Image (cartoon, rainbow, N blue to C red):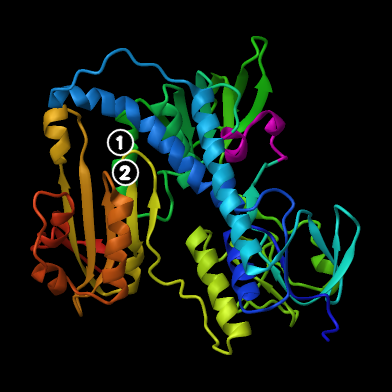
């Protein structure tokens, strides 16, 4: 009989924690999983899933407009924010039910409580005060929006969490931040008819992405009516006499809006976990430090997903969970592969990307071949919409291997997922050139760009 109540105790019911708990329980391990809010984590409950549903909703005004170019005449139309939110909530409830059912069917014990480490192998369930022991502890509590309490008026602002539960759609909003969360919500609110301003301290939105994607997206957003203010940041938010909010910026701008949304990064959820009681090491941001096998400095404690601040993406957390199971319970040491992760920004138009942006590739390779195409998508020829699709391949000239692929346009995320397989397999530009095009599609451009648009040598375009 084991000296512990559980073989594995998982703290956090997000995608990574649930996957690890379900798989371990399926192997016959005695598993408990503790979650203080809802199962599914940020992604399912208040992140990528509900966000994508709102993205779809915000695209319909353009669809209605485009229809006339194809002979359809759409009659009177109206939009109900409460109906959208109710439908979204119903779908989230369904998905959470599936997460719970998967855990129950595998035999994991579900504990609806925050769990705190109180000593070696010991935990306390805050909801009941019960104390339990576990041979291994896995921390997968994710992260949360940074509230920046030091900013005057921060308590008046909303984050992405609250954006999913607003009682009514605001008439105007100022969003501070330039990452994918800020950009996606700017497009969502604008598409739903909200007067939208995006304020970012940097010179261009979406730091870390390829510059051609960044500039072309910003230009497209501005054409749609989104005001983008770079080199600036909100310093103070106050309640105005008319009930609206007054946001003042470093550059002296004043925005009078119904809502201010802060999208200035996320922080690991490591407060009040009791990590200090057993000496688990964290970095300056509070992220748990782990090795390549997701092991902390304490031999029975592991961590994965956003709480480790390695790569903050749901599929990465799930992948890390599967590697944890292989390593700890299948005698098959497996490290997560964080290289060449395909990702998407669900802006409008969206970005799909895998591999290196041009500036990073230029630092790594002596010479690059860059293939760049910008064209009007076929759908826009009849709709009359002024939009462009941008596709870019970055090739290491020495061995012709494609080291970066970046797409701006409709269904770019879908394309990035598939092209990610090609890059993961080490495909060269010659492989792309030998591939027959599917016509007429936008993606055929990826296999028909035969001549480089330019070269990059020693960091300079030539």
Q: Nearer the viewer, residue 257 or 60?
A: 60
Quadrant of the image occupied by residue 383: top left
Q: Secondary structure at mark 1?
A: helix
Left or right: 217, with 153 as reference point: left
Quadrant of the image occupied by residue 308: bottom right
User: Does residue 436 sit above or below 155 in this rendering?
Assistant: below
Q: Nearer the viewer, residue 187 or 129?
A: 129
Q: Is residue 408 magenta?
A: no
Q: Position of residue 405 (x, y in %)?
A: 27, 61
Q: Is residue 126 visible?
A: yes
Q: Secondary structure at mark 2?
A: helix
Q: Position of residue 18 (x, y in %)?
A: 61, 63
Number of marks: 2
Left or right: 70, with 148 as reference point: left
> Gap between marks 1 and 2, in whole Å?
6 Å
Q: Which residue is mark 1?
A: 219
Q: Which residue is mark 2?
A: 215
Over which residues does the magenta segment extend?
149-164
Residue drawn at point x = 68 percent, y = 74 percent? 302
Q: Quadrant of the C terminus?
A: bottom left
Density class for disc 2 (Cα within 10 Å; few <14, some 14-19, many ≥20) is some
Q: Position of residue 148 (x, y in %)?
A: 68, 42
Evaluate if marks 1 and 2 touch, with contact meaning CB atoms under 8 Å apart: yes
Q: Nearer the viewer, residue 322 or 426?
A: 322
């Amino acid at each position: 009989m084991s000296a512990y109540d559980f073989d594995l105790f998982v703290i956090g019911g997000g995608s990574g924690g649930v996957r690890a708990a379900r798989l371990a329980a399926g192997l016959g391990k005695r598993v408990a999983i503790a979650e203080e809010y809802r199962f599914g984590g940020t992604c399912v409950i208040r992140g990528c899933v509900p966000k994508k549903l709102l993205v779809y909703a915000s695209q319909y005004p353009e669809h209605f407009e485009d229809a006339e170019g194809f002979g359809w005449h759409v009659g009177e139309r109206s939009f109900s924010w409460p109906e959208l939110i109710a439908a979204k909530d119903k779908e989230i409830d369904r998905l959470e039910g599936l997460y719970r059912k998967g855990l129950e069917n595998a035999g994991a014990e579900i504990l609806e409580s925050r769990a705190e480490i109180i000593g070696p192998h010991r935990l306390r369930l805050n909801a009941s005060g019960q104390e339990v022991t576990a041979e291994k502890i896995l921390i997968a509590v994710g992260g949360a929006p940074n509230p920046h309490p030091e900013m005057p008026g921060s308590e008046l602002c909303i984050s992405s969490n609250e954006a999913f539960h607003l009682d009514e759609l605001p008439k105007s909003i100022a969003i501070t931040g330039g990452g994918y969360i800020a950009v996606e919500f700017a497009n969502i609110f604008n598409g739903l008819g909200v007067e939208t301003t995006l304020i970012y301290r940097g010179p261009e939105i979406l730091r870390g992405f390829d510059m051609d994607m960044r500039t072309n997206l910003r230009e497209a957003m501005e054409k749609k009516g989104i005001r983008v203010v770079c080199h600036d940041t909100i310093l103070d938010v106050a309640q105005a006499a008319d009930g609206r909010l007054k946001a003042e910026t470093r550059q002296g701008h004043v925005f009078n809006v119904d809502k201010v949304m802060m999208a200035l990064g996320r922080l690991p959820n490591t407060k009040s976990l009791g990590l200090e009681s057993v000496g688990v090491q964290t970095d300056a941001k509070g992220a748990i430090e782990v090795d390549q096998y997701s092991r902390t400095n304490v031999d029975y404690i592991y961590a994965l997903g956003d709480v480790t601040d390695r790569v903050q993406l749901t599929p990465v957390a799930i992948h890390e969970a599967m590697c944890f199971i292989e390593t700890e319970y299948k005698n098959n040491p497996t490290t997560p592969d964080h290289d060449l992760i395909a990702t998407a920004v669900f802006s409008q138009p969206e970005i799909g990307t895998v591999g290196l942006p041009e500036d990073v590739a230029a630092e790594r390779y002596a010479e690059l071949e860059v293939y760049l195409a910008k064209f009007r998508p076929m759908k826009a020829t009849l709709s009359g919409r002024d939009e462009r699709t941008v596709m870019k391949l970055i090739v290491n000239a020495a061995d012709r291997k494609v080291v970066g692929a970046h797409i701006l346009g409709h269904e770019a995320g879908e394309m990035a997922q598939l092209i990610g397989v090609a890059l993961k397999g080490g495909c060269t530009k010659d492989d792309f050139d030998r591939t027959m095009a599917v016509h007429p599609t936008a993606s055929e451009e990826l296999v028909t760009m035969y001549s480089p648009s330019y070269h990059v040598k020693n960091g300079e375009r030539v």
